[in-house]
Amino acid sequence: MINVAKLYEFKPSFGFFAQQLMYPEKLDFHPAFLEASFDQSHPAYTHAHTYWSLMQEFSMEEIQEMYTETFDFQKNCALYMTYFKFEDAKERGQMLVKLKVLYEMYGLEMPDGELPDYLPLMCEFLYAAEWVQDAKTTENFRMPIAILEDGTYHLLKALEKMESPYFHLIKGLRETLKACVEQEAATL
C-alpha cells in the first residue's frame, strides 16, 4: 500500500530525479537544487550526494556525452519503464494508455512526442501533479509505482555493471519509492 503522505513529503526529490534524468544542462547542477531536494533524514540523501559528488568530477560536455552514451545508446539503460518488461508487446501499449489517462486525471498534459512511461516524466508527474487530496490516490498510484519499481530495478542493474554515476541516482529514487510503500499485513 502506498503511503501518500510520505510520497507527498518527498515531492521535491521527485523534481530533482526528473531534472537529473533529462538531458543535462548547466543549471541542473546548481548546488541549491540538491540541498532543496534532500534533507539528512531523506532515504535517498546518501545516494543523491554520492551521485552529485561523482558528477562534479566531469565537465558539462563530458556529462552530456555520458548521458547520451548511457541512455540513448544502451538498450538495457532505456528510460522507458515498461520497455524492460514488455518491449513492444500489446500489454505495453495498454499500460501506456492507462498512464496517460492517469496523468490527465490529475491535470498533467503529456508533452508532444513523449511516451508516458518515460522515467523523467513519471518523476515529474509525482513532483508536479496535485494528488494528495484525492481519496483515490492510493489506489490510482499502484500501477505507476509498480511500473517505476520494476523498470528502475532493471535500469539499476545495468547502470551498476557500467559503474555509472547514474547508478546512485536511480538507487536513490528506488530508496525513496521503497520508503513510500508499506507492506500490507498478511491475511490468515
Image (cartoon, rainbow, N blue to C red):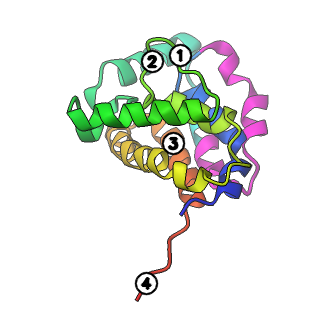
Determine the CA span between mark 3 and mark 1.
27 Å
- The label shown at residue 187 is 4
- Asked if residue 48 lies in the magenta stretch, the reply is yes
Category of crowding for the residue at label 2, using alpha-carbon neighbours closer than 10 angstroms: few (below 14), some (14–19), many (at least 20): few
Residue 19 is one of the magenta-drawn residues? no
> Residue 172 shows which numbered tag?
none
> In the displayed structure, would residue 52 be above or below residue 180?
above
Q: CB atoms at circles 3 and 1 under 8 Å apart?
A: no
- Residue nearer the viewer, 84 or 95: 95
Q: Earlier in the sequence, mark 2 or mark 3?
A: 2
Q: Residue furthest bottom?
A: 188
Place of residue 66 in the rendered image (x, y in percent of width and height, measured from the top left): 43, 20
Q: Secondary structure at mark 3?
A: helix
Q: Which residue is mark 3?
A: 168
Labels 2 and 1 touching (C-beta < 8 A) = yes
Q: Is residue 115 above or below residue 156?
A: above
Specify the amino acid type for callout 1. Pro
Q: Quadrant of residue 158?
A: top left
Dot 4 amino acid type: Thr
Residue under numbered circle 2: 114
- The answer to whether mark 2 and mark 3 are in CB contact below 8 A is no
Q: Amino acid at mark 2?
A: Glu
Label 1 secondary element: loop
